[in-house]
Image (cartoon, rainbow, N blue to C red):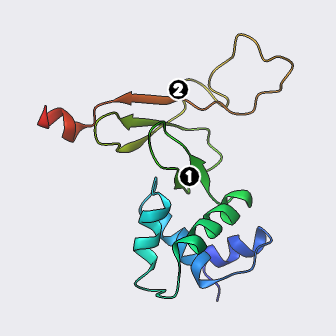
């Protein structure tokens, strides 16, 4: 019986591979991971995997709508599995830790722009910056 990730990959029109399943498994348990962290997590179970293949898998899974790519300023690109709810992020300006913030107010897109220039807005992406609890303790 295929697991949930295999079914999701297949439904997205991608070929199911051990690497793609492993990437989704890692991001389920370690959201906001970058490619290097994903690579480090799957390399022991898939020793023939290269960092380039991890980048390729992350790109394929993102294009297929199975991952969300986030790019906090000054940080590596990160990936997560939490999709479709228009949540936002809070980033520690000291250590780079990232947390999720539910929709600021109401439902997607959560914020109303003063002007859209004719665009139809589906989502809003907000990044809050501050110090995480660990960095606050250290300060």
On screen, residue 127 versus residue 119, left or right, reads: left
In the image, what residue occupies the spot 47% across and 49% down? 76
Task: Determine whether label 1 and label 2 are within 8 Å by CB.
Answer: no
**Considering only vertical position in the picture, is 46 above or below 53?**
below
In the image, what residue occupies the spot 40% across and 72% down? 40
Quadrant including the N terminus: bottom right
Q: CA distance from mark 1 to mark 2?
A: 16 Å
Q: Dot 2 corresponds to which residue?
A: 104
On screen, residue 60 versus residue 135, left or right, reads: right
In the image, what residue occupies the spot 42% across and 35% down? 90
**Considering only vertical position in the picture, is 109 above or below 64?**
above
Which residue occupies the foreground of this view, 78 or 48? 48
Looking at the rendered structure, the secondary structure element under dot 2 is loop
Residue 63 coordinates in the image, percent (x, y): 73, 58
Q: Tell me if I can see residue 70 in this picture.
A: yes
Residue most extreme to the left: 138
**Number of numbered markers:** 2
Residue 32 coordinates in the image, percent (x, y): 46, 52
**Considering only vertical position in the picture, is 77 above or below 6?**
above
Q: Residues within 10 Å of mark 1 (few under 14, many from 20)?
A: some
Looking at the rendered structure, the secondary structure element under dot 1 is loop
Quadrant in the rendering for residue 2: bottom right
Quadrant including the C terminus: top left
**Considering only vertical position in the picture, is 138 above or below 60?**
above
Which residue occupies the foreground of this view, 7 or 22? 22
Residue 43 coordinates in the image, percent (x, y): 44, 80
Q: Dot 1 corresponds to which residue?
A: 82
On screen, residue 135 versus residue 114, left or right, reads: left
């Amino acid at each position: 019986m295929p697991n949930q990730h295999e079914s999701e990959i297949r439904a997205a029109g991608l070929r199911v591979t051990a690497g793609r399943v492993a990437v989704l498994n890692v991001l389920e348990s370690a959201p906001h991971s970058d490619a290097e962290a994903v690579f480090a997590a799957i390399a022991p179970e898939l020793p023939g995997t290269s960092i380039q293949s991890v980048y390729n898998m992350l790109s394929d899974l993102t294009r297929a709508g199975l991952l969300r790519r986030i790019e906090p300023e000054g940080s590596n690109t990160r990936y997560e599995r939490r999709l479709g709810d228009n949540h936002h992020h809070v980033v520690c300006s000291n250590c780079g830790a990232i947390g999720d913030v539910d929709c600021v107010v109401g439902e997607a897109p959560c914020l109303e722009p003063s002007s859209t220039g004719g665009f139809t807005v589906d989502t809003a992406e907000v990044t809050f910056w501050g110090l995480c609890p660990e960095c606050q303790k250290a300060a």
